[in-house]
Every structure is written in C-alpha cells, then in structure tokens.
Amino acid sequence: MCRFHSINGVLYFKVMDAQIAIIKVQSYIYAVSQYAQAALRDVIGGMTLDELLAERQKIGDEIEKVIEKEAKNWGLEVTAIKIQDVDMPEELKKMMSRQASAEREKRATITKAEGDKLAAFNLAAAAMTMAQSPGAMQLRTLQTIDGLGPSPSNTVVLAVPVDIMEAVKAVTSKLGEKK
C-alpha cells in the first residue's frame, strides 16, 4: 500500500426530503461530507497506487454505493462522486517517473531488437538469392555504382571477382592477337 498527502474529490447530492434532512442530521452537508471522506479512506485503503490512478471512476462508484444507503436515510440522494486530485510525496513522483522511463526504454530496446532480427532475416535471404543467381552480385554492384551519382568527391573501391578479371584478360588477349 502507498501513502498520499491528500486526495481531493467532489460529492454531488441533492436534498430529496428537506424535513428528514434537517430533523435527522441537522447539518446534512457536514454529515454527508464526513461520511464520504470515511468511505473514501475505506475504499482506497486497500488499493495500490496504480489501481488508484487508473480506476478513479470505479473508486467514485464504490464510494457512492457505500454512502448511498445512509444518504437516503437522511433524505439525500447522491448523484455523483468524482476523484479530482491525488497529491503524492515528491519521492514517490520521482520513483514513478523513473519507472515510466525504464518502461519506455524497455519497449524501445525490444522494438530495436525485433527490427534487427527482421533485418538479419532479410539479409540472409538476400545473400541466399545472390548465391543462387550467378549474375546477381554483379547487378548489385552496378546498382551501387549507379547510385553514387556524378559527384567527383566519391572514392569507390570495387572488389572484382578473380574469374571476371581472367575473362577480361582472355578477351583482351584475343583482341590483341587479331590486330
């Protein structure tokens, strides 16, 4: 369980029977207010901070159920209860901020890992395709060269397979013999 500095809420009610409200409790506004505060303590006393922050409407509904019967005995009808503000100690706010930050970092790490895994699968598939198709690597090399553009500041180092170099030598030597 956690400790709060204060929890503010609003209680909406209407007087259904003024005579009963005045005779039975005299100060019905004070009485219903005190009863609502006690019900609030009872309801949130067993809740965690996460439940309190996430389920304000549910808390209001539970408090309303608790005080509804007594309010009717006093000639009152509770129309709504709203939790407005939860004031927490600074240390608790800092701790929640660190927890939220760690959760965001965790999600980012998981997303990046999933992306890296997908990229690895795609690279493996591309490598397999290139290994099965003899000219695929040469086509990829030509695409890369084409993508460099006309900029004179690019320095490009190409790794040319030995068998291509031997084929070029054979062609040039044949052409040289013909002359």
Image: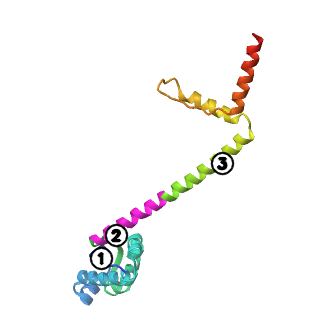
Q: Secondary structure at mark 3?
A: helix
Q: Is residue 152 left or right of residue 164?
A: left
Q: Position of residue 61 (x, y in %)?
A: 41, 76
> In this figure, which residue is indicated by the disc labeled 1?
4
Task: For label 3, count other residues whose C-alpha is less than 10 Å away and answer few (under 14), some (14-19) or many (20+).
Answer: few
Coloring basis for residues: rainbow
Mark closest to the chain's N terminus, 1 or 3: 1
What is the quadrant of the N terminus in the image? bottom left
What's the residue at 63%, 29% (across, down)?
142
Q: Secondary structure at mark 1?
A: loop
49 lies above or below 161: below
What's the residue at 72%, 28% (across, down)?
166
Mark closest to the chain's N terminus, 2 or 3: 2
Count of picture labels? 3
Q: Looking at the image, is mark 1 or mark 3 nearer the viewer?
A: 3
Point out the stretch of residues depicted in magenta: 90-108
What secondary structure is the magenta-colored segment mainly?
helix
Amino acid marked by disc 3 = Ala
> In this figure, which residue is indicated by the disc labeled 2?
95
The answer to which image quadrant residue 179 occupies is top right
Mark closest to the chain's N terminus, 2 or 1: 1
Asked if the residue under mark 3 is in contact with the one under mark 1, i.e. CB atoms within 8 Å, the reply is no
Q: Position of residue 177 (x, y in %)?
A: 76, 14
What's the residue at 38%, 75% (across, down)?
49
Q: Is residue 172 left or right of residue 44?
A: right
Q: Position of residue 11 (x, y in %)?
A: 31, 75
Foreground residue among 113 and 32: 113
> In this figure, which residue is indicated by the disc labeled 3?
124
